[in-house]
């Protein structure tokens, strides 16, 4: 999102300088790019005055919203991807879709007010939700944040806001945020595993978010790690998520903390379990340790099948250091191909919901670019 | 590998008819394409005499060789991918690499004799081996067919044969064969799971074999399906392969058949187990049934993370119908995302070693095309 000279652009894209000049002059005319004085170190092209190109930050504004089980976070971004406003609201469990649409409208109102623009000034809204999301159609087959199945979220949100809306799975958006703003900017292939209320994965292959042939994407959380194993909230047995997610920890926490359950919510219960473990409760520690070992198993499986350059662990629950302790990371190394010359690179980014909101914003920026400038652009609907 | 008109080519590639005319006239000059009378139904382009283009079958010949634990199979292919000769030799377990290079030389000699050409007439040799293969460097980190680790197969074979040699994992070559000659010709994303002595997977994404960032590819057989589970021949525990491969069945067959073991080889033991199961031995049936359930779990995991258009089950062991019985396929359906609108398409191709040899031949053809015509071509070394 910085400056780049035309010469550098030509080299990086592998096209002729003349082609860059033609293409960029159109984008400058349309107001998407501006010329700025060349930064030191960049070289002039063809004896012109030394200038670089920069995305015109004011060309458009978009909003990105991430729904989660704890809170809903919205950001407004300018066309260069800079955050110009932020808002959040605590989550209400499994609210009816209509209520969540009203939450969305309030969040959009808040970020617009903070950014000093009207909602009608937004070029696009991007939304990220956990669960099974059909990005192409904008439908949410199932999500823990909705009290209903098969919600036509893009259509309903668009009708309420009077704005174009694009929707994706939150783990895909975490990957998109890393691709646009984070560690993934210089990589062609990487994976982001998100651990929040559930376990998700976003995968970037050849600089693009991989969504699979049917657009359902990568459901790491529901890969099976034990035949006839623990019951998952998806209704199936032995899913990885059923061993590492909040609700998996909560299930054992009831035993460990000798609680009757029911009155204590899942998230609070896990917080108490974590406090107990930190205070030296060996049973509480064993629960996190076991979840960490299953997480390691799942991460090793990701590395064995996708062989990414980098694996990023992301999400709110990465605060629980037991889950990514040295032993866990070492266990990943012991479960991947012995033939690998180098152990896989693993980074922990406990960035939480703001990252997801930025990913939703990047999705919106991609859709705007795609629509206004044409051509496939990462993050745009299929 | 059939005929195609220039107009159809332009439409399928999304380029201009003029560009097709320019490019193909070069290829005709170089002898890689020939003009043939237009097939009925195809349309003329720009009023020229109605002709179609066909790959010039005689432009080059290549050989493809597949090494496996049971036998080694070689084919010679013409430049259009037609088989012009075939040869095979029984395998000897874990032979020293030098002996296997001699086997290779004999197989190449046999197919050349049958094709009526000299080995020096081959433009390229492709080799497929099971195990951990670094396609880019041509090194075999580990393979059950070699009695040594870290074999520089491409270099050693090339030195012995005096021909360029390219090497890949046998499951990648099964996928390449399906892409060039089989069910994958019209698909952009599909997976081939091979079950022979071990369990392998080849994955085609966007019409190309996916090899991962580090070139080690997709190691489905060593994804973990149970924490601290059954011992795998890779030395790790809980690998899918350790529940479904020959040696996994053989381990339980010793118990079921009340055999002391040692004197009966792995493959024969599994054949006897299969005969027992077919004859009504309930214990023998339960061994296959359990392996089938684990295979179903592994296939569901493939579908959950890659979301392919088609999943092909391939390899010698697919003869064991218990492994792909209706219940197994149904079990896959019950372990994938409930959100999928349609159950995944699964096909069983018990094609065996000849398919792998054709894949090795396709790899060789890709390398020739890449070297002689330029530009990245599927199957060529990175």
Image (cartoon, coloured by chain):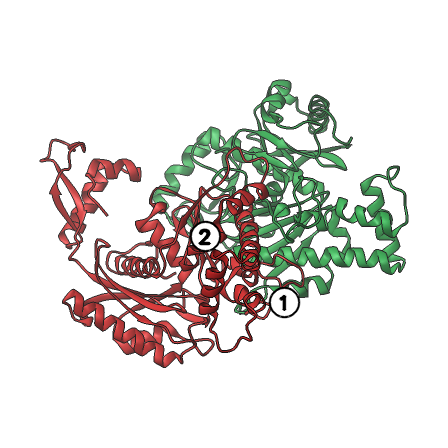
Chain colours: A green, B red
Task: Name the residue that disc number 2 marks.
Answer: B321
Q: Residue at x 52, y 53 (%)?
A: A189
Judged by depth in the image, the label closer to the viewer, 1 or 2, is 2
Residue A94 can be seen, yes or no = yes
Q: Nearer the viewer, residue B213 or B344?
A: B344
**Along the horizontal axis of the image, is A236 left or right of B8?**
right
**Along the horizontal axis of the image, is A126 left or right of B38?**
right
Q: Nearer the viewer, residue B183 or B132?
A: B183
Q: Position of residue B182 (x, y in %)?
A: 33, 48
Secondary structure at numbered mark 2: helix
Q: Position of residue B219 (x, y in %)?
A: 51, 59
User: Total number of numbered labels?
Assistant: 2
Q: Position of residue B367 (x, y in %)?
A: 30, 60
Q: Position of residue B67 (x, y in %)?
A: 37, 68
Q: Quadrant where the N terminus of chain A lies?
A: top right
**Along the horizontal axis of the image, is A254 left or right of A150?**
right
Q: Residues within 10 Å of mark 1 (few under 14, many from 20)?
A: some
Q: Nearer the viewer, residue B121 or A348?
A: B121
Residue A199, numbered circle: none
**Relative to A109, does residue B44 appear above or below in the rendering?**
below
Q: Farthest residue in the left direction?
A: B49
Secondary structure at numbered mark 1: helix
Q: Quadrant of residue B78?
A: bottom left
**Quick check: do tags 1 and 2 share a chain?**
no
Q: Residue at x 17, y 67 (%)?
A: B114
Mark 2 belongs to which subunit? B
Task: Name the residue that disc number 1 marks.
Answer: A334
Q: Residue at x 77, y 53 (%)?
A: A320
């Amino acid at each position: 999102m910085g400056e780049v000279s035309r010469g550098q652009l030509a080299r990086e894209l592998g096209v002729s300088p003349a082609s860059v000049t033609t293409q960029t002059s159109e984008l400058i005319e349309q107001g998407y790019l501006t010329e700025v004085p060349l930064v030191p170190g960049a070289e002039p092209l063809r004896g012109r005055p030394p200038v670089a190109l920069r995305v015109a930050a004011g060309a458009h504004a978009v909003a990105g919203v991430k729904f989660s089980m704890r809170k809903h976070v919205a950001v407004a971004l300018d066309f260069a991807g800079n955050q110009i406003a932020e808002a959040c609201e605590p989550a209400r469990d499994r609210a009816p879709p209509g209520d969540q649409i009203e939450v969305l409208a309030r969040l959009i109102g808040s970020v617009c007010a903070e950014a000093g623009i009207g909602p009608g000034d937004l070029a696009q809204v991007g939304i990220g939700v956990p669960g099974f999301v059909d990005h192409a159609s904008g439908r949410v087959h199932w999500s823990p944040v909705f009290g209903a199945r098969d919600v036509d979220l893009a259509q309903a949100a668009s009708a309420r806001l009077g704005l174009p809306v694009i929707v994706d799975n939150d783990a895909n958006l975490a990957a998109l945020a890393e691709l646009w703003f984070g560690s993934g900017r210089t990589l062609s292939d990487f994976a982001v595993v998100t651990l929040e209320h559930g376990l998700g994965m976003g995968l970037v292959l050849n600089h693009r978010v991989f969504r699979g042939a049917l657009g359902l994407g990568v459901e790491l959380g529901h890969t099976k790690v034990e035949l006839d194993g623990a019951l998952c909230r998806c209704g199936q047995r032995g899913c990885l998520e059923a061993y590492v997610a909040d609700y998996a920890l909560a299930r054992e926490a009831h035993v460990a903390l000798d609680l009757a359950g029911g009155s204590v919510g899942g998230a609070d219960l896990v917080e108490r379990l974590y406090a107990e473990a930190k205070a030296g409760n060996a049973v509480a520690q064993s629960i996190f340790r076991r979840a960490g070992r299953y997480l390691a198993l799942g991460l090793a499986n990701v590395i064995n099948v996708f062989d990414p350059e980098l694996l990023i662990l992301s999400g709110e629950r990465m605060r629980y250091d037991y889950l990514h302790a040295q032993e866990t990371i070492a266990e990943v190394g012991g479960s991947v191909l012995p033939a690998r010359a180098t152990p896989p690179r693993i980074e922990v980014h406990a960035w939480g919901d703001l990252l997801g909101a930025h990913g939703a914003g990047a999705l919106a920026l991609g859709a705007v670019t795609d629509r206004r400038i044409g051509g496939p652009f990462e993050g745009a609907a299929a």
